Each structure stands twice: as structure tokens, then as C-alpha cells.
Image (cartoon, rainbow, N blue to C red):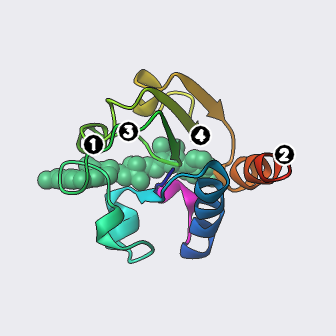
Amino acid sequence: VSAGRGVGKKENVENVRKLAEALGGELGASRPVVDSEWVEHSHQVGTTGQTVAPKLYVACGISGAIQHLAGMKKSDFILAVNTDKDAPIAEVADVLVVADVNQFVPALAEKISSK
Ligand SMILES: Cc1cc2nc3c(=O)[nH]c(=O)nc-3n(C[C@H](O)[C@H](O)[C@H](O)COP(=O)(O)OP(=O)(O)OC[C@H]3O[C@@H](n4cnc5c(N)ncnc54)[C@H](O)[C@@H]3O)c2cc1C
């Protein structure tokens, strides 16, 4: 469950971390999030980070640049949350939720945690 620049600020990464925990997954991040020191580099997904292929990859506010896709496009199922329905991530996503990541992600995490 990865945070992109679209989360807006460091504090909002916690929403993404909580969703990762609710799903029993790991926190990932795009390079700008790592460069901003919101998340450690060991969690970066992409050509200059980790390559992952989980059953479910959740891209939270990530545009889908080629360098990011290289690290996660082999995931079984890709759920993307983005305010831009035309973001490049839509080309690889199985489901694109067009929503504000800072509203949708906490709501989803809460729903899953309450099950
Ligand atoms: C040599 C090289 C190596 C690189 N290696 C990597 C790498 O390993 N990993 C990596 O990730 N990148 C890498 N990059 C950088 C890459 O090119 C992109 O710049 C980067 O992936 C963009 O990160 P992002 O999607 O988080 O940010 P952006 O491209 O800025 O996208 C942010 C997205 O968030 C959306 N958004 C904005 N606000 C909200 C909101 N409130 N709710 C929902 N969505 C919102 C926007 O519509 C946008 O699609 C590399 C680049 C180079 C040149």
C-alpha cells in the first residue's frame, strides 16, 4: 500500500500506513515521498527502489510514472486512488477510484478494521 505525492503532506502518510496495517500489508512509497523524507528509502517502489509483486497493490495518490510502474506492475491486482481519472496509473490499474486519497483511504481502512 503505497503513498504518492498526492497525499499532500507527511502527516497524511499515516492514513496510508493504517490501510497497509488493516490489510496485513506493507507501506510503500513513490520517490517524491521518499525524497521529501516522509518515508524511508527502503520502502521506495520503482526502478531506484524495490520491485514488488503482491496479490494486491494499492497506489494512493501516485501518478503512475514509468519508473514507478517498473517496480509494481506485476502485482496481481492494482487498486489506484487518484483525483485525476486520466492519470497514467489508470492504464495498469484493475480498479481506479477517483477520489481524494485523504478521504477515501481512512474510510476504507476503518471499514476493513471494523470487520
Ligand atoms: C532516473 C529516475 C529514477 C526514478 N526512480 C523512481 C522510483 O524508483 N520510484 C518512483 O516512484 N519514482 C521514480 N522516479 C520518479 C518518477 O519519474 C516520478 O516523478 C514519480 O514516480 C512521481 O511520483 P508520484 O506519482 O508520487 O507524484 P506525482 O507524479 O506528482 O503524482 C501525484 C498524483 O497524485 C494525484 N493527486 C493529487 N492530489 C490528490 C488527492 N488529494 N487525492 C488523490 N490523488 C491526488 C495527482 O493527480 C497525481 O496523479 C524516478 C525518476 C528518474 C528520472
Residue at screen point 26% across, 46% down = 51
Magenta stretch encompasses residue 80: no
Q: Nearer the viewer, residue 42 or 36?
A: 42
Q: Which mark is residue 81?
A: 4
Question: In front of the other: label 1 or label 4?
Answer: 1
Q: Position of residue 18 (x, y in %)?
A: 65, 62
Q: Amino acid at mark 1?
A: Gly
The earlier-in-sequence mark between 3 and 4 is 3
Ligand 1 has an atom within 8 Å of the beta carbon of the residue at disc 4? yes
Q: Which mark is residue 64?
A: 3
User: Pointer 1 and pointer 4: residues touching (CB < 8 Å)?
Assistant: no
Helix, strand or loop status at disc 3: loop
Residues packed near mark 4 inside 10 Å, few (<14), some (14 to 19) or many (20 plus): many
Question: In front of the other: label 4 or label 2?
Answer: 2
Q: Which residue is mark 2?
A: 115
Ligand 1 has an atom within 8 Å of the beta carbon of the residue at disc 3? yes
